[in-house]
Image (cartoon, rainbow, N blue to C red):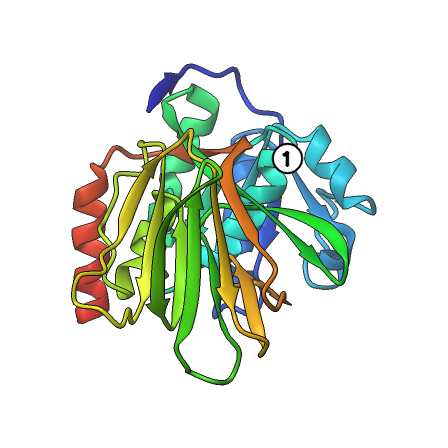
């Protein structure tokens, strides 16, 4: 984590997930607060049907909007923030996540903390750089590449049958798994599906790739953490429907195509407006989940 004494921000993009309860209400609250601070509010043109304030600039070209802004604010749950973070990372823009979801592990702010938005113009905030994983495979005969911030999962579709996986490291075979699936996760994703599958919690400031088997059929099969220079490949054996799911938002039927994983050249710059240790946040969020 590195301190950032930034000049006053001039233009911020708001990306709300309106399927979340009260997201529109909180988006208006955030927009009003930013305007009080002298910050221009930008939104994508489809949002004009909901947010018609004359002080908001609506952009037709989404990519150009992200390229032109100073920073992005995503308003929603973890899925919303992760989706927006990848757009921000591609343009090398920082992003602030405001949690209106359930857990919000990657959020830098809760909706009852909007007074802290003032730090965006005083420079009293930090940026956390989060690594992503580049995922490559073939889909319908075409080479495909994706960037994931949380995880990539290889598993069967509607059938929960055992799969045999061959896993290699730096082009050398290292192990064979029998499991319902494999999760390849970043440190950020260690608190998501990987955690539910028995994987460890990893400090997101680290750079590594976490491999977690789903329901492994061996008592001696455990998650493995690889360093960030590792090039990992996995192939599921079988001719039935095998899917690759990317950050829980896109799923490809890849059959027994090989999938490779390596550290991405892009990284996410998460804005934090309050200082809390990562493990303190994890304890708080998991306590909320238990409650």
For image coordinates 42% across by 20% down, the residue present is 123
Furthest residue in direction front, as rendered: 173
Give the quarter of the figure containing the N terminus.
top left
- Image quadrant assignment for residue 65: top right
Q: Which residue is mark 1?
A: 90
Q: Is residue 288 above or below residue 52?
A: below
Q: Nearer the viewer, residue 258 or 101?
A: 258
- Going by the image, does 279 lie left or right of 31? left
Location of residue 142 with respect to 255 vertically, above or below = above
Residue visible at 29% across and 35% down in the picture: 274
Q: Residue furthest bottom?
A: 159
Callout 1 environment at 10 Å: few (<14), some (14 to 19), or many (20+)? some
Q: Quadrant of residue 88?
A: top right
Foreground pick, 66 / 114: 66
Callout 1 secondary element: helix
Q: Nearer the viewer, residue 31 or 172?
A: 172
Total marks drawn?
A: 1
Residue 17 is at least partly visible in this image = yes
Residue 169 in the image, given as x and y percentages of width and height: 42, 40
- Measured as percent of width and height from the top left, residue 86 is found at 58, 43
Q: Position of residue 183 (x, y in %)?
A: 40, 58
Left or right: residue 277 versus residue 264 is left
Q: Residue at x 26, y 38 (%)?
A: 203
Judge whether residue 99 can be spotted in this image.
Answer: no
Q: Is residue 126 found left or right of 264 in the rendered image?
A: left
Q: Is residue 251 above or below residue 13?
A: below
The image shows residue 236 at horizontal and vertical percentages of 50, 64
The answer to which of 205 and 220 lies nearer the viewer is 220
Quadrant in which the C terminus appears: bottom left
């Amino acid at each position: 984590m590195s301190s950032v004494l930034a000049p006053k921000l001039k233009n911020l993009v708001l990306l709300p997930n309106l399927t979340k309860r009260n997201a529109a209400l909180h988006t208006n609250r955030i927009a009003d607060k930013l305007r009080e601070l002298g910050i221009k509010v930008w939104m994508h043109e489809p949002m004009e049907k909901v947010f018609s304030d004359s002080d908001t600039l609506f952009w037709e070209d989404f990519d150009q909007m992200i390229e032109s802004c100073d920073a992005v604010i995503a308003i929603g749950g973890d899925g919303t923030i992760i989706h927006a973070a990848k757009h921000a990372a591609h343009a090398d823009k920082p992003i602030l996540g405001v949690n209106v979801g359930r857990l919000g592990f990657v959020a830098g702010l809760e909706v009852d903390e909007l007074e802290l938005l003032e730090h965006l113009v005083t420079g009293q905030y930090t940026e956390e750089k989060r690594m992503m994983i580049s995922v490559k495979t073939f889909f319908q005969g075409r080479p495909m590449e994706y960037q994931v911030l949380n995880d990539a999962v290889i598993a069967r579709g509607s059938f929960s049958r055992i799969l045999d996986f061959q896993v290699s490291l730096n082009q050398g075979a290292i192990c064979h798994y029998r499991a319902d699936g494999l999760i390849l996760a970043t440190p950020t994703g260690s608190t998501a599906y990987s955690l539910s599958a028995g994987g460890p919690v990893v400090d997101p400031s680290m750079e590594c790739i976490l491999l977690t088997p789903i329901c492994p059929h061996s008592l001696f099969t455990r998650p493995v953490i690889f360093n960030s220079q590792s090039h990992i490949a996995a192939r599921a054996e079988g001719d039935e429907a095998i899917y690759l799911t990317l950050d829980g938002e896109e799923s490809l039927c890849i059959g027994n195509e090989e999938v490779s994983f390596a550290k991405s050249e892009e990284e996410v710059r998460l804005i934090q407006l309050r200082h809390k240790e990562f493990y303190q946040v994890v304890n708080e969020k998991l306590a909320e989940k238990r409650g």
